[in-house]
Image: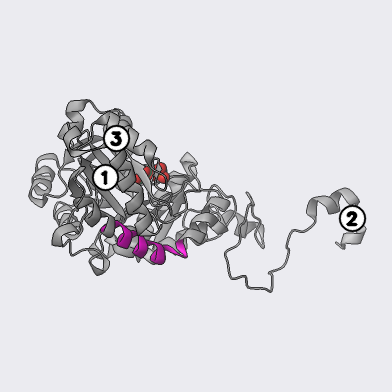
Amino acid sequence: MGQDRLDFETRAVHAGVPGDPVDYRPTTPAIHPATTFTGETVQDTHAALDARSSGFVYSRNANPTVRALETAVADLEGAAEGVAFSSGMAAFHASVLAATADGEPTVLAARDLYGSSRGLLTGLLRSLGLSTHLVDATDPGAVDRAFRETGASLICFEPISNPLLRVAPVQRLVEISHSHGARALVDNTFATPYLLRPLALGADLVTHSATKYLGGHGDVIAGVVICDEELAVKVREIRTTTGAVLGPFEAWLVLRGIRTLPLRMRKHCENAFALARWMAEQTAVRHVHYPTLEGRETGQFRDGLGGGMVAVETNLNRAQVEEFLNRLQVAVPATSLGDVETLVLYPPLASHRSLTEEERLDAGIGEGLIRISVGLEAIEDLFSDFAGAFGSVYTPSASR
Ligand code: PLP
């Protein structure tokens, strides 16, 4: 019906909605805020409700901007499918549910898995009947034994652990899991697909907190699961049912971040390696954790790079660490990681504050440990900043 024959109220409601395919090709992805979509025919609309459909009908099922992000991350990880979530935790949660839905409800988890992921497995999901056994993911022999003893159907681990940056041998762990008929879920948040593509090494599912390096600018909370088509159907059904969907604007922010991921990752790695070497020479520092420091070769990351995170065991006591953090002028004392600016975290009072002292020490987290997400600043400014902060709280004679 011609617009001029419709009433003002009706025209106001329908104004500006594109009816026909547009004839321009933008160079950036579009943001589609629509919650609902209609098809050419009502049959198309109904068919799009199927979890296997590539159509759109309701944004809790699928949304074009979110789909663009899923396609981008799947492409970078070398996977068939991606499913985006409202956070990294929601992505991890759905992955565990999908991966254990048809198997033994027993999971192996790396002892130093990200705290909330570990908490989900050993707390909430345990109370719902899932049993989780913690293993040292850097020790393939221990993982093999744990599979034999527990009959677990899934292992969850990170290639670079948090906060001690221990490296797990991804391919070996995947082979062991498969030899026991189990699946391997790799949280690739720290490495990103730029450094490592776990699916190419046989992993069954990869999860990301896209809040970190994929987004990269500290302005969005998001998560993504990457896997084959069959698992993706389950993951998608879980998302549609539980409703942990990513908004289109948030998907767009991650998409924008991804466009500079390789450049940022390379610089994060260069800065982190330089800072790790610099830290090793400071009198206030007794040990530096960095995957490729002192010729340590992990062999599994692109071009021998070691990631953007550094952890240092300092000679500072708790009060000195807090003062040190207050003195920083460039680096920011804050949680999270993977942002353009350098972020410094004190695990005993932040990520691991819920542990008893005994548990914390057992996890290898001493009182003087500081975790640094190294940003993209000029490295000399970071050296000066850390030197100034160390100098104001520590002299060797004042050590504990
Ligand atoms: N996985 C890792 C390795 C993380 O560091 C985090 C958050 O810090 C998460 C998962 C959870 O991600 P989000 O905060 O986006 O839920």
Residue at mark 1: C-beta within 8 A of ligand 1: yes
Q: Residue at x 50, y 48 (%)?
A: 220
Give x and y (percent) for residue 299: 18, 65
Q: Dot 3: what SS?
A: helix
For badge 3, the amino acid type reads Val
**Residue 94 at least partly seen:** no
Residue at mark 3: C-beta within 8 A of ligand 1: no
The reply, left or right, for residue 266 in relation to residue 8 is: left
For badge 2, the amino acid type reads Leu
3 in magenta: no
Q: Dot 1: what SS?
A: loop
Give x and y (percent) for residue 296: 14, 60
Tell me the quarter of the image containing the C terminus: top left
Q: Residue at x 21, y 48 (%)?
A: 282
Give x and y (percent) for residue 353: 30, 30
Q: Nearer the viewer, residue 381 or 334?
A: 381
Query: Which residue is tagged 1?
Result: 162
